[in-house]
Structures are given as C-alpha cells and as structure tokens.
Image (cartoon, rainbow, N blue to C red):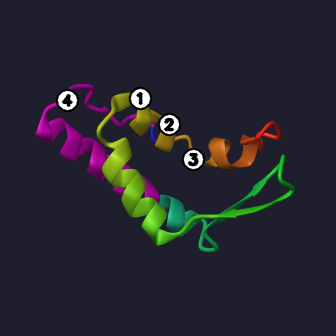
Amino acid sequence: MNSNITIPQGNSSEEIKQREKIIRDFYHKWKEDNPSQCRYNLSLKDYINIRMVSIIETSEHAAKSYLSTIAVLQLDAILIGAKKNFNQ
C-alpha cells in the first residue's frame, strides 16, 4: 500500500467516491503486479483466486467505510493469512 495516500474518513458521498477510486486504483495496480489474480493461502494450502466481480463488489461496498477501505488495501496479507473456520 502506498503510505502517501490520504484516505478520507468521512461519510459524505464525495468521500465515499474518493475511497472507491482509491480501492479501484489499488486493485488495478495489484492486478498488474499479480497477473494470475491469485494468492497462495497458508491455512488452506491452496490458491485463492480474485475474480473481477469480487473487485467490483468490494470497491462498491468497502468504500462505504473508512476501516473497510483500509482492510482492502491489506489484500495480500488477508489472502495469505486468512484461516478457515473449522467450527462451522
């Protein structure tokens, strides 16, 4: 994540649009760096694939919250370190 990015924290429609653009720009760069659009997950011992529909849905929903936007920008760490809940 580019630490020089200022992420708006408010809830106005303009701030949500700005966060959505930040997320879409992040995904664009991520896809350039990861043309296979997947990351190996340590818990599953398998690849997690990122589909375009996931990117669109995430950018629309995560942009509504500052904290959700921050989480999206940690995509690699989340995909690699996510653990399967074996209690379900």
In the image, 46: left or right of 69?
A: right
Q: Is residue 32 left or right of residue 13?
A: right
Q: Secondary structure at mark 3?
A: helix
Q: Secondary structure at mark 2?
A: helix
Can you tell which mark lies on residue 75?
3
Amino acid under disc 1: Leu
Give me the disc on residue 11: 4
Label 3 Cα crowd, 10 Å radius (few <14 / some 14-19 / many 20+): some
Q: Residue at image x 80%, y 36%?
A: 87
Q: Position of residue 30 (x, y in %)?
A: 52, 59
Prevailing secondary structure class for the magenta stretch in the rendered image: helix
**Outermost residue toward the right?**
45
Q: What is the x, y in percent for residue 34?
A: 61, 66
Q: Amino acid at mark 4?
A: Asn
Q: Is residue 68 magenta?
A: no
Residue 71 has which mark?
Answer: 2
Judge by depth and name the residue closer to the eye, 82 or 5: 82
Estimate the spatial distance between the alpha carbons at disc 3 and disc 4, rounded to whole Å.
Answer: 23 Å
Residue 59: x and y, percent? 36, 53
Dots 2, 1 in contact, CB < 8 A: yes
